């Protein structure tokens, strides 16, 4: 392991930084698009060796400087640190930026020397990257961070007593949604910073309608430090707490600064033509006329109710649909289609959204239940045909907009399941006559399939993240498309005045959004031209025309330096690249190739880090003379999704939170989970055997504790042919206390000193003794506490009594293992004293969303698969998904010996 790094320390501008072997490697693989796997193990080991003593690095300045010029946001994040140590060390830099932004510059200053990034074709950068990684360097990581951000991290070796400055610049065009623009900055400095500053300047020649600013970390004390100055065409928002003000409490070293800084604003809209800026040879046109009446819509909701939607997802879908139905306008028409492998619709044609019909539909929605497979093709075609037929039969208003909203959480696996053929079928059926919006729920959908399909049909796709706010996400998306104002919008500019225009035809304009077109002036000196906009509105056609003319920014903003420079050109380039990247996904093969080539060329020319390019900074050579490039990439939505599938979901605030202590559990059919919060990871495995078998779960000869469990099978073999087994009875023995406990799905018995106490699941009861406490929560759980420091919870899963296959079963959770000795063993017990493992070499698995990897554990090399199991403690009905590494084959290689070694002869027997 080359002597390049002494200790590794963390310098954080953004990010909660947990370096984990499994996590880090996963990210490494993603950021270089797979390929060979040089030495990721080495890299991980290196990270593990990081020192926790961070005091030898002082981050003394963190500034975020954002300038918005007519929606085009240019943000510079600067971070300065000093290596106070007596030796050189690695300093980390991490920053989070919006996923909609492109990095445009990354540079470093070390000992007076500036190293500036250069944008290169991704393939070329990848070679450099691989070379660096194979020589043991960390060359840079980009990974998804939550729903909206992505995280960029690099490190650099800095000499003793030297300073380093990292400067990252990114740009984006702010998109108007639901009547506002949003600027999101994430700051997590992790320590007190002498100079901390976030400054945003917004220049909007149309005039600013409102500005809201807040931060997730703003307490009442910090709130007054947020300064906001708004004049007609300019807003300035700044926040710069002193070191004292950053402290969590007087004398504490912790910082309050940790979270999202969010600014929302909108501009005034005077005329129907919108605003046109001509600057430096380029123009941009913002079109969002105020006060247009809405056009009625005909919407078919196509709802996936396949088995995978079960639990919270189907509940949230029903809730969202109910809210959406209530929001329909009376002049809208709607239809509801639900599908698994069968397709059924509420009515055979669209229905007017009057109160009675909506009320009737709500009853239908409340009865949507999950079951079966996923026939996306059949369901969509049913929806399309319904709209086509109703149009032909003249049942729908002449002037109205037709749309289909598909909600699905899985891959098509019933009916036509070839995604390419589905796209072709749907495209042919729709024939450009309606819009298709696709909502991909959770991580198991093939998002790029949905994305391409909706873009092929005048629509767009959106991801719905599996979390407690999914209902709101669904409603939020619906609101965005709920109010069409115009359809078939054409923006026209004279051919002799402008060229290289971005898209100028739009299928719809929705209330609260905005159409943006940019282009180049043929003649730099040109200072006005005619602009026309046509569209189909409610009742009549919409047309507006007017002159675009040069506005003198020097007059608009007399007191500012000439800060606006080339923003129109960069805005044009940003928009053009975005549209080319879309075309490179959706077009015909030759169009795709041409669009990709053009997008690459422009990304290089304008220095944008897009999915086709990378930014490379060649940092100073290390002592051993190796070249060490730092590389920034851009993720596609598909890569983001793939990354999320692999990473534990612990970091997302709304989803699963790991317990503070490790938990060792078995639940389901029987799924064992070893949850390791300190590693932010989990292991899982199944042990299958014949019904009736009794397994030893915990055995500790020193403390005299024994836990065995017996499995039973389903009532009969289900149609899928696999019989499931479950634990239904546990025996717990505490030898030294002379105590025995038998817990079954029927009842609970305690035996002590020849006496038997009998408890029923149907009562809530508690039993307190000198050495043992029992707490029964009616029909739900039993908590067993032994001598204050061993704690088990047994969960009762009650199945519908007439269920054709399943029976009631139990789950067993170990929550506290203090009292156990080092000789504790058993299927769960052997993990109580910790388990060391490393995971490397992530690779595609049999199922796309479940990649395989290699695990090194107990001196063995195992093939493992990323998957999920459920922990039911907080939600006994649906459970919460715990992402984990699944060890195949009855956990062979992970558990000591063979699974059969754990079979015992009786519920209270140790052999
Ligand atoms: C650095 O070296 C000086 C002198 O040798 C010593 O006094 C000091 O404690 C060292 N500092 C650190 C952080 O090791
Ligand atoms: C990138 O940033 C560096 C340092 O701030 C600066 O010197 C350089 O000019 C920038 N490059 C571009 C293309 O803006
Ligand atoms: C459009 O949205 C605004 C609020 O953003 C609202 O006041 C207005 O009534 C809406 N117009 C239509 C036609 O829905
Ligand atoms: C689309 O609409 C046009 C005009 O109404 C019609 O001629 C055409 O057949 C439609 N296409 C499909 C595939 O239904
Ligand atoms: C793709 O580019 C080639 C070469 O520039 C050109 O001849 C061809 O017409 C383009 N094809 C499409 C579909 O744009
Ligand atoms: C693991 O899987 C790979 C293929 O992905 C195979 O070549 C190898 O033999 C397997 N190793 C073990 C220990 O099963
Ligand atoms: C392990 O797995 C195999 C195959 O699934 C099964 O037949 C066997 O009975 C399992 N149980 C034990 C204890 O080995």
Image (cartoon, rainbow, N blue to C red):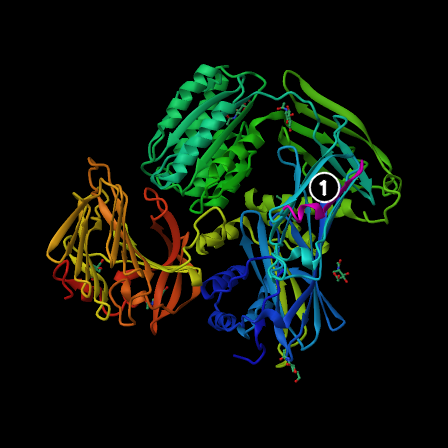
| Disc 1 packing (10 Å; few <14; some 14–19; many ≥20) | many
User: Can I make out residue 348 in this image?
Assistant: no
Q: Quadrant of ligand 7?
A: bottom left
Disc 1 is placed on an element classified as loop
Please count the marks in the image.
Answer: 1
Q: Position of residue 285 (x, y in %)?
A: 75, 36
Is label 1 within 8 A of ligand 3 (CB to nearest ligand atom)? Answer: no
- Indicate whether 775 appears above or below 822: above
User: Can I make out residue 507 in this image?
Assistant: yes
Please state which of residues 742 and 412 is positioned toward the viewer in this rendering: 742
Image quarter where the C terminus lies is bottom left
Q: Which residue is mark 1?
A: 71
Please state which of residues 877 and 258 is positioned toward the viewer in this rendering: 258
Instruction: Please report the residue visible at 21 percent of the width from the left and 46 percent of the height from the top.
Output: 721
Instruction: Please report the residue visible at 13 percent of the width from the left and 51 percent of the height from the top.
Output: 756
- Report if residue 600 lies within the magenta region: no
Choose top left, top right, bottom left or bottom right for residue 329. Answer: top right
Instruction: Please report the residue visible at 38 percent of the width from the left and 49 percent of the height from the top.
Output: 881
Left or right, 141 with reference to 277: left
Left or right, 821 with reference to 587: left
Q: Position of residue 784 (x, y in %)?
A: 26, 54
- Indicate whether 601 appears above or below 903: above
Left or right, 422 with reference to 831: right
Q: Position of residue 266 (x, y in %)?
A: 70, 35
Instruction: Please report the residue visible at 68 percent of the width from the left and 58 percent of the height from the top.
Output: 244
Q: Position of residue 79 (x, y in %)?
A: 69, 62
- Report if residue 226 lies within the magenta region: yes
- Indicate whether 583 appears above or below 647: above
Q: Residue lying at the far front in this picture: please name it.
A: 770
User: Magenta part of the protein: which range?
Assistant: 220-233
Choose top left, top right, bottom left or bottom right for residue 837. Answer: bottom left
């Amino acid at each position: 392991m080359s002597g390049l790094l002494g200790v590794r320390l963390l310098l954080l501008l953004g990010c909660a930084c947990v370096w984990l072997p499994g996590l880090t490697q996963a990210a490494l693989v993603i950021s270089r698009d797979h390929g060979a796997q040089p030495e990721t193990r080495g890299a991980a080991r290196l990270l593990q060796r990081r020192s926790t003593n961070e005091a030898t690095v002082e981050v003394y300045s963190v500034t975020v400087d954002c300038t918005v010029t007519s929606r085009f946001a240019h943000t510079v994040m600067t971070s300065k640190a000093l290596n106070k140590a007596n030796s050189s060390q690695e300093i980390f830099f991490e920053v989070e930026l919006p996923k909609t932004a492109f990095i445009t510059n990354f540079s470093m200053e070390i000992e007076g020397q500036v190293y500036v990034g250069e944008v290169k074709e991704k393939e070329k950068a990848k070679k450099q990257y691989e070379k660096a990684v194979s020589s043991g360097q960390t060359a840079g990581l980009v990974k998804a961070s939550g729903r909206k951000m992505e995280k960029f991290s690099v490190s650099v070796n800095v000499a003793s007593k030297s300073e380093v400055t990292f400067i990252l610049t990114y740009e984006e065009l702010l998109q108007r949604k639901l009547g506002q623009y949003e600027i999101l900055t994430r700051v997590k400095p992790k320590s007190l910073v002498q100079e901390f500053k976030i400054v945003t300047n917004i220049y909007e020649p149309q005039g600013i309608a409102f500005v809201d600013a807040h931060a997730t970390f703003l307490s009442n004390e910090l709130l007054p430090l947020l300064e906001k100055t708004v004049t007609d065409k300019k807003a300035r928002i700044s926040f710069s707490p002193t070191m004292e003000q950053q402290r969590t409490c007087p004398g504490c070293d912790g910082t309050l600064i940790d979270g999202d800084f969010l600014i929302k604003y909108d501009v005034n809209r005077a005329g129907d033509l919108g605003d046109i800026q001509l600057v430096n040879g380029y123009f941009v046109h913002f079109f969002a006329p105020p006060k247009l009446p809405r056009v009625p819509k005909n919407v078919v909701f196509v709802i996936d109710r396949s088995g995978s939607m079960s639990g919270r997802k189907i509940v949230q879908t029903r809730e969202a649909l109910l809210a959406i139905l209530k929001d329909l306008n009376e002049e809208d028409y709607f239809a509801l289609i639900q599908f698994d492998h069968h397709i059924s619709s509420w009515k055979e044609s669209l229905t007017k959204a009057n109160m009675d019909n909506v009320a009737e539909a709500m009853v239908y929605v409340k009865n949507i239940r999950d079951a079966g497979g996923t026939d996306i093709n059949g369901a969509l075609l049913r929806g399309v045909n319904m709209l086509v037929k109703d149009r032909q039969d003249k049942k729908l208003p002449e002037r109205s907009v037709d749309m289909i909203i598909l909600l699905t959480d899985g891959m098509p696996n019933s009916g036509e399941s070839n995604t390419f053929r589905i796209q072709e079928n749907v495209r042919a059926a729709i024939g450009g006559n309606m819009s298709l919006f696709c909502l991909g729920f959770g991580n198991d959908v093939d998002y790029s399939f949905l994305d391409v399909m909706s873009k092929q049909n005048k629509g767009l796709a959106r991801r719905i993240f599996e979390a407690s706010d999914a209902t709101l996400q669904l409603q939020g998306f619906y609101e965005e498309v709920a109010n069409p104002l115009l359809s078939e919008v054409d923006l026209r500019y004279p051919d002799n005045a402008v060229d290289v225009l971005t898209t100028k035809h739009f299928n719809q304009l929705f209330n609260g959004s905005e159409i943006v077109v940019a282009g180049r002036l043929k003649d730099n000196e040109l200072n006005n031209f005619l602009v026309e906009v046509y569209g189909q509105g409610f009742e009549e056609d919409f047309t507006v025309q007017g002159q675009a003319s040069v506005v003198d920014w020097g007059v608009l903003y007399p007191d500012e330096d000439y800060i606006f420079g080339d923003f129109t050109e960069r805005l044009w380039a940003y928009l053009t690249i975005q549209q080319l990247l879309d075309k490179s996904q959706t077009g015909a093969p030759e169009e795709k190739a041409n669009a990709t080539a053009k997008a690459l060329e422009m990304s290089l020319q304008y220095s944008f880090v897009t999915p086709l390019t990378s930014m490379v900074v060649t940092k100073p050579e290390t002592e051993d003379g190796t070249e060490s490039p730092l590389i920034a990439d851009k993720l596609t939505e598909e890569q983001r999704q793939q990354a999320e599938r692999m990473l534990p979901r612990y970091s997302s605030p709304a989803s699963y939170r790991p317990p503070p202590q490790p938990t060792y559990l078995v639940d389901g059919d029987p799924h064992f989970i070893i949850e390791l919060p300190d590693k932010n990871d989990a292991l899982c495995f199944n042990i299958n055997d014949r019904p009736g078998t009794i397994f030893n779960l915990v055995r500790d000869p020193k403390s005299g504790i024994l836990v065995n469990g017996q499995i039973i099978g389903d009532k009969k073999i289900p149609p899928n042919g696999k019989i499931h087994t479950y634990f239904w009875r546990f025996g717990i023995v505490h030898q030294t206390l002379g105590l025995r406990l038998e817990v079954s799905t029927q009842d609970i018995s305690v035996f002590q000193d020849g006496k038997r106490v009998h408890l029923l699941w149907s009562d809530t009861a508690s039993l307190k003794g000198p050495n043992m406490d029992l707490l029964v929560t009616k029909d739900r759980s039993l908590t067993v506490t032994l001598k204050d420091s061993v704690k088990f919870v047994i969960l009762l899963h009650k199945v519908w009594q007439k269920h054709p296959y399943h029976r009631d079963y139990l789950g067993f959770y170990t929550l506290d293992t203090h009292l156990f000795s080092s000789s504790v063993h058993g299927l769960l017990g052997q993990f109580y004293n910790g388990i060391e493992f490393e995971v490397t070499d992530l690779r595609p698995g049999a199922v796309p969303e479940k990649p395989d990897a290699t695990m090194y554990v107990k001196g063995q090399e195992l093939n493992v698969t990323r998957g999920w199991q459920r922990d039911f403690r907080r939600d006994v009905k649906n459970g919460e998904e715990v992402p984990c590494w699944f060890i195949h084959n009855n956990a062979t290689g992970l558990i000591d010996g063979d699974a059969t070694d754990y079979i015992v002869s009786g519920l209270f027997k140790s052999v």
